[in-house]
Image (cartoon, rainbow, N blue to C red):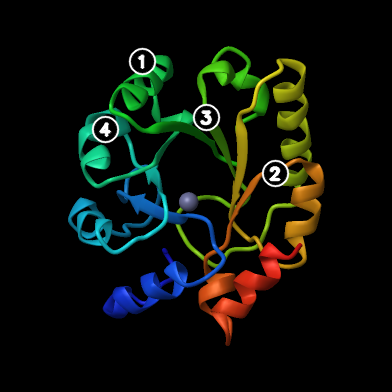
């Protein structure tokens, strides 16, 4: 929803409700962990009753463990925290689950997937950033495809069912190679919202 019209959020939420999209992906930025500020919990809270699909909340903030209750109270289905922002990741992941949410861990483009070896069994999802977090509409970092393949291999080797989500630069060109590499969920922001017919664009992505 980072690329939605913030002065007409209800209209864009309805569009997603009526589309073939499976989830709402919500990027919260603090201007510290990433060089931008998006929106915070009052906006998320306001969206709670309107979103008819699961809310996938991606916290691009320092110390995300301080806000687990706030995110849960906003009705989030999935809470993603950055590996780079968590000193005690296992504790944070456990607390997210105790609050009744699915737990996701996000990796920045430079963070290798091998760092998840000892936590992956506790995760419901891994979110790989395929751009540097902070802004919508950035160019896809091609290396994300190799990372997806590597992560999928780790998940298979351990016999897990952890989902792989990709965020950044997803479009009709990059999506097929990501799906082929093992991605389960693709986040599309500006590619959908800036397209002439967002419902059709979502349909085209879903048909891949
Ligand atoms: Zn995101």
- Label 4: few (<14), some (14–19) or many (≥20) C-alpha neighbours in 10 Å: many
Write down the residue under mark 2: 183
Residue 1 percent coordinates (x, y): 42, 64
> Alpha-carbon distance for marks 1 and 2?
26 Å
Secondary structure under the numbered disc 4 in the rendered image: helix
Foreground pick, 98 / 187? 98
Residues at marks 4 and 1 touching, judged by CB atoms closer than 8 Å = no
Q: Nearer the viewer, residue 130 or 154?
A: 154
Judge left or right: residue 77 versus residue 183: left
Residue 201 is marked as: none
Q: Which disc is residue 124 wearing?
A: 3
Question: Of label 3 and label 2, which has the lower sequence position?
Answer: 3
Q: Position of residue 166 (x, y in %)?
A: 61, 48
Q: Where is the C terminus found, in terms of image quarters?
A: bottom right
Pointer 2 local density, CA inside 10 Å: few below 14, some 14–19, many at least 20: many
Marker disc for residue 91: 1
Q: Residue furthest top?
A: 118
In space, the residues marked 1 and 3 are separated at their CA atoms by 15 Å
| Contact, mark 1 vs mark 3 (Cβ under 8 Å) | no
Q: In percent of the image, x 31 and y 57: which residue is there?
A: 37
Q: Nearer the viewer, mark 1 or mark 3?
A: 3
Classify 10 Å Cα crowding around label 1: few (below 14), some (14-19), many (20 and above).
few
Q: Residue at 53% across / 70% down in the picture?
A: 190
Reading the image, the residue beneath label 4 is 68
Q: Residue at x 24, y 35 (%)?
A: 67
Would you say the beta carbon of the disc 2 residue lies within 8 angstroms of ligand 1?
Answer: no
Which comes sooner in the sequence, label 2 or label 4?
Answer: 4
Q: CA distance from mark 4 to mark 1?
A: 12 Å
Which element type, helix, strand or loop, lies under badge 3? loop
Is residue 138 or residue 151 the one in the foreground?
Answer: 151
Task: Compare marks 4 and 1 and give the one earlier in the sequence.
Answer: 4
Quote the CA–CA distance across marks 3 and 2: 14 Å
């Amino acid at each position: 929803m980072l690329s939605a019209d913030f002065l007409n959020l209800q209209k864009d939420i309805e569009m997603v409700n009526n589309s073939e999209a499976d989830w709402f992906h919500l990027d919260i930025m603090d201007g510290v962990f990433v060089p931008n500020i998006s929106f915070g919990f009052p906006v998320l809270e306001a969206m709670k009753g309107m979103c008819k699909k699961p809310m996938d909340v991606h916290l691009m903030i320092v110390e995300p463990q301080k806000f687990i209750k706030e995110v849960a109270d906003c009705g989030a289905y999935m809470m993603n925290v950055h590996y780079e922002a968590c000193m005690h990741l296992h504790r944070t992941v456990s607390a997210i689950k105790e609050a009744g949410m699915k737990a996701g861990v996000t990796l920045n483009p430079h963070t290798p997937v091998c760092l998840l070896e000892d936590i992956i069994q506790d995760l419901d999802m891994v979110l790989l950033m395929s751009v540097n977090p902070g802004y919508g509409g950035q160019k896809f970092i091609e290396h994300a495809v190799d990372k997806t393949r590597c992560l999928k291999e780790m998940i298979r080797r351990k016999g897990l069912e952890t989902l792989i989500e990709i965020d950044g630069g997803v479009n009709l060109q990059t999506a097929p190679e990501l799906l082929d590499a093992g991605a389960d969920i693709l986040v599309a922001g500006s590619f959908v919202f800036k397209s002439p017919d967002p419902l059709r664009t979502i349909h085209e992505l879903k048909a891949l």
